[in-house]
Structures are given as structure tokens and as C-alpha cells.
Image (tube, rainbow, N blue to C red):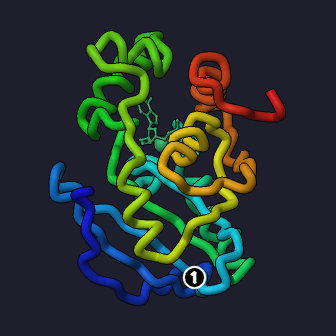
Amino acid sequence: MSTVFVAASRLPTPYGTFTMHGFEDEATGKEHLALTMGDFDDGAPVLGRIHSECLTGDALFSIRCDCGAQLEAAMKAVAEEGRGVILYLRQEGRGIGLLNKVRAYELQDEGADTVEANEKLGFAPDLRKYDMCDVMLRHLGITKMRLMTNNPRKVDALKGLDIDIVERVPLQTGQNPHNERYLATKVVKLGHLYNNA
Ligand SMILES: Nc1nc2c(ncn2[C@@H]2O[C@H](COP(=O)(O)OP(=O)(O)OP(=O)(O)O)[C@@H](O)[C@H]2O)c(=O)[nH]1
Ligand SMILES: [Zn+2]
């Protein structure tokens, strides 16, 4: 496994103070983060989110997707429990990278949906990997999670890594007219569970 722990620090946020753990994937050069609150010594399932980078949604307040709202809701949920983890994985644009996501958005402005846009650019609809989570969660002492996600393929990918997902916690937030088609495409083409669909 090529992901290694590098350093940890405090990270005060409007929702509370997390500990930020930095990891490096030596094979890809990607720098991933884990934010934690509380301790995990008792082995009880940990409320958590595995969030893929979305610079536009997470940092630029874009409401073209639901990522920023999901990240904020997950951080608040962890802070409310006083215990939990957010893995922030640097796989922008479902793994195609930031500028390819801008290309995909351009195609979507011309009528394609998110999956068609990826395909027109020569990419599979979702190129993300979750194997780095194994090292990151193990380093943090987490083996059981209550995972905040609407994506059953994410749950399956983690189960394949020997992480016990004891519960899927829906994370439905941030709907607006600009992301209506995006959310509908996730349900119809990518198998996301939304409004019990
Ligand atoms: N290629 C591509 N990536 C996108 C697009 N919109 C958002 N993303 C990326 O999609 C990733 C988030 O994936 P989603 O499919 O929204 O959600 P998920 O992580 O699979 O599932 P949840 O846990 O329910 O949020 C982030 O990396 C975003 O940058 C798009 O139109 N095209
Ligand atoms: Zn997004």
C-alpha cells in the first residue's frame, strides 16, 4: 500500500475543532486528508463521510452539484456527535481532474448529462478508487463506520477493503434548480439512492 501518514494538526472550523491528518499517496502524488473529532479507542462504529474533492462545490460555493452542502452537513453531523471522521480524497471530478471537469461542464452546458459528458471526453463515468481509505482508516484506528452517503457503490467499494460499514446514513441536502438534472442523473445512471428512489 503506497499511502503514508505525514503529519497531524488542529483544524478549528465554524462547526468545532477537528484534528487534520495528512497522508501522501506515493504512487500518485495525491495528498489526502482526514478530519477527526473524538477518539475511537472503544471500537464503536464511527460516523463518517468519504468525500471526493470538488473544488467548485467545496471551495467556490458552486451549487451546480451538492458537494459543498454535503461536506458542510457531514462536518456539522460529526461535530454534533462530538465523534467522527471525514476523509477528504483528492480525486476531483470523479477522478478526471479539475480541468477535465470544466470540459465536462462545458459539454453539459451544451446539453449532455454528467455521464454522457464524461463519455464524450473518453472517460468512464466514475474513475474513483477507495483503496487509500484502508490505510487512512487503519491509521486512525477505525474499523467500523456509519457512512454518510447516497452512493451504494461507495459502500460496496469500502466493504471490499475490509471496512465494516454497519449503516449507510443518507446525506440528502443542497438540492436547488441548478443541480436538479445532476441529481436525477446520479439516481438514474449511477445508482444513487435519493428520496428513497
Ligand atoms: N466528471 C464529473 N465529476 C463531477 C461532476 N459534478 C461533480 N463531480 C465530482 O463528483 C464527485 C462527487 O461525486 P458524486 O457522484 O456527486 O457523489 P458521491 O461521492 O459518489 O456520493 P455521495 O457520497 O452520496 O456524495 C466530486 O469529485 C465532484 O468533483 C460532473 O459533472 N462531472
Ligand atoms: Zn461537486
Q: Quadrant of residue 129?
A: top left
Would you call the spot at circle 1 few (<14 residues within 10 Å), some (14-19), or many (20 or more)? some
Image coordinates of residue 136 in percent, x first then y, are: 40, 66
Q: Residue at x 69, y 69 (%)?
A: 45
Quadrant where the N terminus sits is: bottom left
Q: Position of residue 60 (x, y in %)?
A: 41, 53
Q: Is residue 135 above or below residue 193?
A: below
Query: Among all residues in the image, which is located at the extreme front?
Result: 162
Instruction: Please state which of residues 86 and 11 is positioned toward the viewer in this rendering.
Output: 86
Q: Is residue 113 above or below residue 133?
A: above
Compared to residue 151, the image places residue 143 above or below, namely: below
> Which residue type carries mark 1?
Met
Q: Is mark 1 within 8 Å of ligand 1?
A: no
Q: Residue at x 67, y 84 (%)?
A: 42
Q: Which residue is mark 1?
A: 37
> Which image quarter: residue 74?
bottom right
The part of the image, by quadrant, that contains residue 102 is: top left
